[in-house]
Image: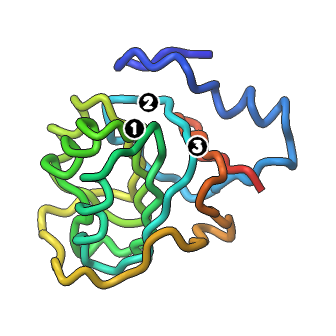
Amino acid sequence: MTASAAGNTTSPNTADLYDERGEELASVSVQFQSLGGRSHFSGPVRTIRCFQDNALVKSTLATPGNGAVLVVDGGGSLGTALMGDMIAESAVANGWAGVVINGAIRDREAIAHLDLGVKALGSNPRKSAKAGAGEVDVDVVLDDVTFRPGATVWCDPDGILVER
């Protein structure tokens, strides 16, 4: 296991994990950027499906995370940010291990200093809608990989693995 800059030593390297478990795990081939202060993170999956509206992301990360990883399917949109530094700070305060966003974040320099794993496609300073449109704790598919609530996900600079 490799420790991150934030001191997380509980999450194994994805390459080693894949060598051990092979096809029990699905690997996401999309090249998500590692943007948080925690380089290695893992935990049970929670999910949100939304498009350019971060109200559900904000309200979910304001609840106890208990070491979970929130996987957000933002439809791959880079048009608006689905998380900024204030929402990320809330995630840290509430015990979330990390967030994977199939979309954009903002405030990436501030988020890089937080003890939170963050994978996203990129960044955009434009804020999103706040209507609350979307779904929580449903299966989401990113790059033909299904993320089921409760499955375990592992993330590090090499990529993202999830239990099949």
Q: Which residue is mark 2?
A: 39
Query: Quick one: label 3, few (<14), some, or many (20+) residues within 10 Å?
Result: many
Q: Quadrant of the N terminus?
A: top right
**Of residues 92 and 117, which is closer to you in this image?**
92
Helix, strand or loop at mark 3: strand
Residue at 33 percent across and 41 percent down: it is 35
Query: Quick one: label 2, few (<14), some, or many (20+) residues within 10 Å?
Result: many
- Compared to residue 125, the image places residue 110 above or below, namely above
Helix, strand or loop at mark 2: loop
Residue at 68 percent across and 65 percent down: it is 145
Q: Quadrant of residue 55?
A: bottom left
Task: Tell which circle, 2 or 3, labels the residue nearer the N-terminal end.
Answer: 2
Q: Nearer the viewer, mark 3 or mark 1?
A: 1
**Of residues 11 and 112, which is closer to you in this image?**
11
Three-letter code for the amino acid on which mark 3 is drawn: Gly
Instruction: Give percent across and percent down for residue 47.
Output: 48, 64
- Tell whether label 1 touches label 3 (CB within 8 Å): no
CA separation in Å, label 2 and label 3: 10 Å
Residue at 59 percent across and 60 percent down: it is 149
* Marker disc for residue 159: 3
- Tell whether label 1 touches label 2 (CB within 8 Å): yes
CA separation in Å, label 2 and label 1: 6 Å
Q: Which residue is mark 1?
A: 117
The color scheme shown is rainbow
Helix, strand or loop at mark 1: strand
Task: Tell which circle, 2 or 1, labels the residue nearer the N-terminal end.
Answer: 2
- Compared to residue 115, the image places residue 102 above or below, namely below
Left or right: 82 with respect to 110?
Answer: right
